[in-house]
Image (cartoon, rainbow, N blue to C red):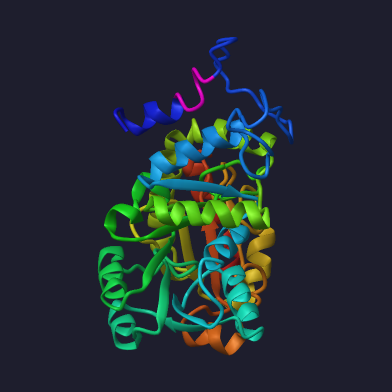
Amino acid sequence: MGENIETFLAQLGNRVDEQTGAVSAPIHLSTTYSHPKFGHSTGFDYTRTKNPTRAILEEGLAKLEEGAQAIVTSSGMSAIQLVFQLFPAGSAFLVSRDLYGGSYRYFKEIERQGIAKFLYFDTEEELAAQITENISAVFIETPTNPLMREVSIKRVAEIAKSKGALTIVDNTFLTPLRQKPLTQGADLVVHSATKFLAGHNDILAGVVVAKTQELGERLLYLANTTGPTLAAFDCWLFIRSLKTLPLRFNQQEKNAKIVVEVLQNHPAVKEVFYPGVGAMVSFKIADESKVGPFLEQLKLFTYAESLGGVESLITYPTTQTHADIPEAERLAYGLTPDLLRLSIGIEDAHDLAADLTQGLSIVTRK
């Protein structure tokens, strides 16, 4: 990028408006654009196809993930849907078994419609044992949601490539600040940008980044055809959010490590899941019958779905984010009713630790 990532993001969108010298990039709300004369275009014709504000954001995201082309969409799920439009009907995919419930729901729906087939794996060894030339792509989360399981992107990509399959990585949890899948062999990266990238629980957005220009051009065509467009104002908010991404994420990760230590030493906690990086933490409570009282006892952590914002959240995957995964399947791979997921914010870490400690006291109370 030519400069440190903090500098690049802080300067994103600066100096693009030479006419006025605006430091903050303008919001271009126009849906249509005038042609200078017959047969000529400014490069912008219709906002579904291309928008000046969105172009700044997409160029920035492509550089951030070190890819050829980024496309921002109206949600994380629309980003995933856009990627799977690359493949013809009847394609088969191998997918991380532990994954976001919304992704699972979408995969099951297109499988029900006979559009595609999905097989699941936990480890690189299981992937290598299952993959054949009939697999079109491997889709992974690493770390996974919510059990924080990890695989080597490099190894997964090697296995996929050996059978002619693409590798797709959901990089929502770690962001390009901690993990750049395209530099490790992946072909496509997706994000629920609603989460850490946007970071304030006020923008719904998704991102797809392609490693090659060829894949990028195909995705641009599909995005223009199907229209999962992110509005200009949301693109501007997204640009503004990215300027503070390193500050936010560094603090969230710092806080998470303090919270993890507290949880690991608390008698009301059976097990803690944390990959040693990032700001997502899951843990199993000693008495699952106390989940409700524990949640009601918390003062700082907000009991809500989603993650990645500056405010700390706590989620109960069994009834919230992963409710669409059948119970037997959830239990089989370890997503049990005693599991809670934390998204750590930028508050004072000791205040967060104190809130969890006082909340967990209800679990050990006789």
Q: Is residue 291 left or right of residue 159?
A: right
Residue 250 spot, x, y in % from top left: 40, 40
Magenta residues span: 11-16
Determine if the magenta segment contains residue 359: no
Q: Give the residue displayed 46% in from the left and 36% down from the top.
A: 60
Direction front: furthest residue: 38
Which quadrant: the C terminus? bottom right
Please state which of residues 197 and 109 is positioned toward the viewer in this rendering. Answer: 109
Q: Give the residue displayed 62% in from the left and 33% down from the top.
A: 44
Determine if the magenta segment contains residue 13: yes
Q: Give the residue displayed 46% in from the left and 41% down from the top.
A: 61
Direction top: furthest residue: 20
Q: Quadrant of residue 226?
A: bottom right
Q: Is residue 246 shown to the viewer in this render?
A: yes
Please state which of residues 235 and 286 is positioned toward the viewer in this rendering. Answer: 235
Please state which of residues 171 and 315 is positioned toward the viewer in this rendering. Answer: 171
Which quadrant: the N terminus? top left
Residue 321 spot, x, y in % from top left: 62, 67
Counting the numbered discs, the total is: 0
Please say if 343 is above or below 337: above
Residue 125 spot, x, y in % from top left: 27, 82
Q: Give the residue displayed 63% in from the left and 32% down from the top.
A: 39
Q: Is residue 173 shown to the viewer in this render?
A: no
Please state which of residues 22 and 277 is positioned toward the viewer in this rendering. Answer: 22
Residue 232 spot, x, y in % from top left: 67, 36
Q: Quadrant of residue 188?
A: bottom left
Magenta stretch, overall SS: loop
